[in-house]
Image (tube, coloured by chain):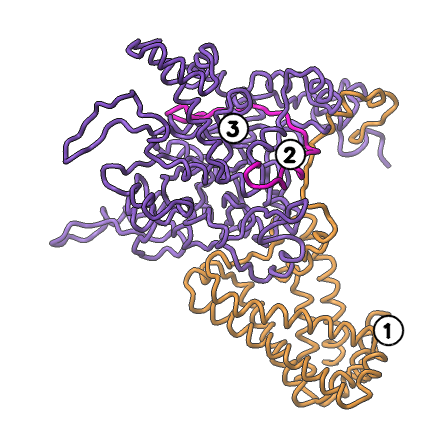
Chain colours: A purple, B orange
Amino acid sequence: MDIRSQVSMVFHLDKCIGCHTCSIACKNIWTDRKGAEYMWWNNVETKPGTGYPTKWEDQDIYKGGWEKNGDSVSLKGAGKLKGLKNIFHNPHLPVLDDYYEPWTYKYQDLFTAPEGDDQPTARPVSLVTGEHMDVQAGPNWDDDLGGSPDYARQDVNMNQLSAAEQEAMFQLERMTFFYLPRICNHCLNPACVASCPSGAIYKRGEDGIVLINQERCRAWRMCVTACPYKKSYYNWHTGKSEKCVLCYPRLESGQAPACFHSCVGRIRYLGVMLYDADKIENVASVPEDQLVDAQMDIYLDPFDPEVIRQAQLNGIADSTIEAAQKSPVYKFVKVWKLALPLHPEFRTLPNLFYVPALLPTMATVSSGVYNSTSQSLWNGIERNRLPMKYLASLFSAGNTDKIVEVMKRLMAVRIHRRGVTVGDLNSSEISSAMNEAGVDAETADAIFRLTSLATFDERFVIPPAHREESIEILESTADVKGNTGFGFKEKPARGL
Amino acid sequence: MTNYLLFVALPYLSLGIFLIGSIYRYRSREFSVSSISSEFLEGRKLFWGSQPFHWGLFFLFFGHLIAFLFPKAVLAWNGQPVRLLILEITAFTFGLSTFIGVILLVNRRLINRRVQIVTSKMDVVVFVVLLVQIISGLLVAYHNRWGSSWFAAFITPYLRSLFVFDPQIEGIASVNSLSLKIHVVSAFTIIGIIPFTRFMHFLVYPLDYLWRSYQQVIWSWNRKHIRTSRSHSEGRQSTNN
């Protein structure tokens, strides 16, 4: 057993209001620079939709992630031979137009335009070439199902659905959507790290954050292709790839990452998960329908005395183990089994988990009459407004049973709380829903509390970085006692 | 005198600048060492230019290297006219592919607005020396036939003499071919400007990727060592004073 700790995340999609505050917080701190204007390390997509960059989920186009290869996995579009063969031209690289051409407006023209018959206008200019441009696409061009014939209907997750099911999703009365905020998943089996020919990308041992060493990056661009989530971006100005750093300078000083901290809907949770690094290859290579369960198994119970002992032997600090015990991510993912990884079939073992949006049917329309009365309160999971197959394609590699289990538990919590707060449901209905989902009242209240009422410190349990101890590996603290600063560049001895 | 400047002073100057400059740039300004790819801004035209250019150059480079290192083997191979023809035609094809590639790349830089934006002055220099180098090489191959054979007589002894610090330039100076002289001079110029241009990127071709493990985990310090160490403070000299 090789126990390591990983800073992991949960996004509760039922709470996301799609305000893009997270994206703006990130942009202001990290990507408001030349060459990075088009990058959104954090972005929020409307689902169904084609996302950013367009159709990023379609690995027939971009060849990202891993594929099963016998008992192991191999990179789909990169790797040692494929990577070095394609080094002069990477055939699957998304180009600027697959994202969008960044632009600004010539605001100064509003003031300096000569007097004339027309109102002065601020025309859009490209942030790449500086010339006038017609804006063809932008971030969240398809927000809230805008332009759905071109975007939502092209969503690759609908490939599993029959034509009739697809059609049903786009009837005006039935149309629905939810938001999918995305950041780097800081995967356990990162494809970007494996694909980097220069060895510039690495996973930090202490907290599992995946970073690109800007000095070592040589612009071979393999990570951009290999990341199936398209969360590694090429900076066209510096000639270096960049990605989400999970605000590690903030984490090291005990602050939540900017996108987490600024989240208006408080949908984001961050905490430590302990996992067994020896199992990564096995888990990444199981058949598709077992991927979710296999990944859940790699995370260990931080209360198990044996796990604690092994973690201590592996040098994990007691404070980190304590953080793992308090971790909200552990509760959502392992204890309550409410959160699922995004596209586990990419086999990177992502560490960002999503609680799917419930979207129950609240009313029916018959012969033009909107009828909000129904036999049961939320009409049951099977009449959910988004087909289970669609959600399964996103969160469980097509395994519908997993989604139904999660949805039933989410519904049981709602029904239980409705009983507590409103009391208009009869107790047999409540208990049957809870029994079917396997949730007791105590658990349901705990889920409710962490979902709705959690404080800042309950949502973000950040392990201390222990930088105060790191000095001990560099030098003997006994020897440098009495010195200040960084020591001497030359020995403090009498010279020549 | 001119011959001495071109075939003795320039090579040593270039090699010196190359060695010191590239080591200095790699060690102290590593951020600037990059292939600075522009595929992200324009991908289609790059394919048709970059592939023939780089692969042609790749084989030509090793062709020259083999002719320099193993002249006798090349001469032995060329002993039969058929094999000589095969070698020369193959090499010329790679030369043409490099030439076509670089023309397409120049064209792409000239007409694509986005690529123009990321074109620096050094890129212009790079294209000029590359064009000189490739065109002169093609002319040599066409006019001064069977270079793979006379390389052993004229070029190999000259290059060897440079590397043993006993420059013998009579051979190369006596060659009556302007294009060959241009080819040699521009070759050394290219070597000399490597540290100041994007040419740096072929020095960092990532061969070590072939034998490294796919996943890389870096520990900023060894926590296990701290937790279990019994020796980290006793008798260990600190490293910075």
Type of residue at label 2? Arg
- Vertical order, B152 against A431 (above or below): below
Marks 1 and 2, Cα distance to the nearest angstrom? 52 Å
Q: Nearer the viewer, residue B225 or A142?
A: A142
Left or right? Give the position of A323 relative to A22. Answer: right
* Same-chain check, marks 3 and 2: yes
Type of residue at label 1? Asp
- Vertical order, A458 against B159 (above or below): above
For disc 3, the marked residue is A9
Q: Earlier in the sequence, mark 3 or mark 2?
A: 3
Left or right? Give the position of A432 relative to A479. Answer: left
- Vertical order, A379 against A220 (above or below): above
Residue at figure coordinates x 58%, y 24% from the top left = A272
Tell me, yes or no, if residue B110 can be seen here: yes
Rate crowding at label 1 as few (under 14), some (14 to 19) or many (20 or more) other CA atoms within 10 Å.
Answer: few
Marks 3 and 2, Cα distance to the nearest angstrom? 16 Å
Q: Is residue A275 magenta?
A: yes
Q: Is residue A456 magenta?
A: no
For disc 2, the marked residue is A204
Type of residue at label 3? Met
First to last magenta residue range: A261-290
Given the image, what chain letter belongs to the residue carrying mark 2?
A
The answer to whether marks 1 and 2 mark residues whose Cβ atoms lie closer than 8 Å is: no
Given the image, what chain letter belongs to the residue carrying mark 3?
A
Marks 1 and 3, Cα distance to the nearest angstrom? 67 Å
Q: Nearer the viewer, mark 1 or mark 2?
A: 2
* Same-chain check, marks 1 and 2: no
* Same-chain check, marks 1 and 3: no
Residue farthest along the right direction in this orientation: B235
Residue at figure coordinates x 59%, y 48% from the top left = A67
- Vertical order, A369 against A343 (above or below): above
Element assignment for label 1 = loop
